[in-house]
Image (cartoon, rainbow, N blue to C red):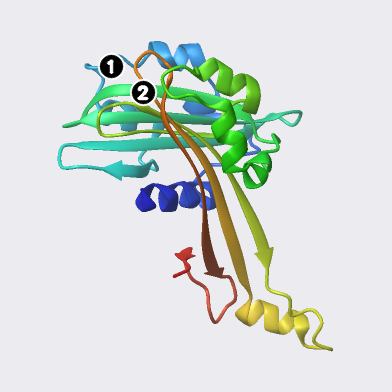
Amino acid sequence: MKYLYCAMLVSFFGLSGCSMLPQAGPLAGKDVAEINNTIVDGKTTYSDLQAIYGDKAVLINAWPDKKVVNWYRTWSSGFTQDTTVLSVLTDKNTVTRHIVLRYKTSTDYSFVSKLSDVELTSFVTPGKTTFQEIENKFGKPNDNAFDEEGNQIVIYMYADISNSQFGWLPNVGGYVEALAGSKKIKLNTLQFIMNSNNTVKAFSLNANNYHQGVGLLNSSGVIEDK
């Protein structure tokens, strides 16, 4: 599960394919229903999807014969901005399950960082609470995955990001920031594993801390705090 968090964080920071160009691309430029109709579970292959959506997919999770791969595309026509997520579970290169998710990029997901276990437990009843009830309460999710058995994982995530503060240093604050600046990141995730009948099988609320060097001397990828 830790790998899942790291993959989501990578997608959050750098692999959304954001574009302000007139061309939305094949993922953002089609209706969700149209994308769904072009993918046939049990027949469409991962290679087929690579040919359409490119090879910049994010590996979310993997097992000996199966893997979960997501494509992300954020696009704006100048008036609104949407993010589209295509999430697929493959078994030996064949797509066995897929979900297409589209949400407004401006949606505020900060509620995830304020949600308590008590509040969540009082709302969710495994085997009874439905996906529609989850969406009615929390809105559209902003990510998706699958477990090895093919159950959909509905994901809400929010990242609290704080930059290092060197500005208080007289005369040299900006210089120090450029050389050795850093970010602290707290990734809050709310996940619902769904049954085949669209009721909740299990759920979790987690917070993981990361940091990233962003200066010329300490530039790094996103690293989990120990």
Give the spatial CA distance, label 2 vs label 1: 7 Å
Residue 165 or 131: which is nearer the viewer?
131
- The residue depicted at 70 percent of the width and 38 percent of the height is 108
**CB contact under 8 Å: marks 2 and 1:** yes
Q: Which mark is residue 41?
A: 1
Q: Position of residue 87 (x, y in %)?
A: 40, 30
Residue 102 or 216: which is nearer the viewer?
102
Could you say which quadrant of the image residue 55 lies in? Answer: top left
Q: Position of residue 59 (x, y in %)?
A: 34, 44
The amino acid type, in three-letter code, at marker 1 is: Asp
Instruction: Give above or below for 147 relative to 102.
Output: below
Q: Is residue 106 left or right of residue 34?
A: right
Residue 222 visible in the picture: yes
Could you say which quadrant of the image residue 198 lies in? Answer: top left
Q: Position of residue 90 (x, y in %)?
A: 25, 30
Callout 1: helix, strand or loop?
A: loop
Residue 140 or 49: which is nearer the viewer?
140
Q: Mark 2 or mark 1: name the one nearer the start of the chain.
A: 1
Q: Is residue 201 left or right of residue 10?
A: left
Could you say which quadrant of the image residue 134 lies in? Answer: top right
Q: Is residue 177 left or right of residue 219?
A: right
- The residue depicted at 36 percent of the width and 52 percent of the height is 3
Residue 23 visible in the picture: no
Q: How many marks?
A: 2
Q: Quadrant of the C terminus?
A: bottom left
Q: Is residue 38 left or right of residue 81?
A: left
- The residue depicted at 26 percent of the width and 20 percent of the height is 44
The amino acid type, in three-letter code, at marker 2 is: His
Q: Position of residue 182 (x, y in %)?
A: 61, 72
- Label 1 neighbour load within 10 Å: few <14, some 14-19, many 20+: some
Residue 3 or 216: which is nearer the viewer?
3
Q: Which residue is mark 2?
A: 98
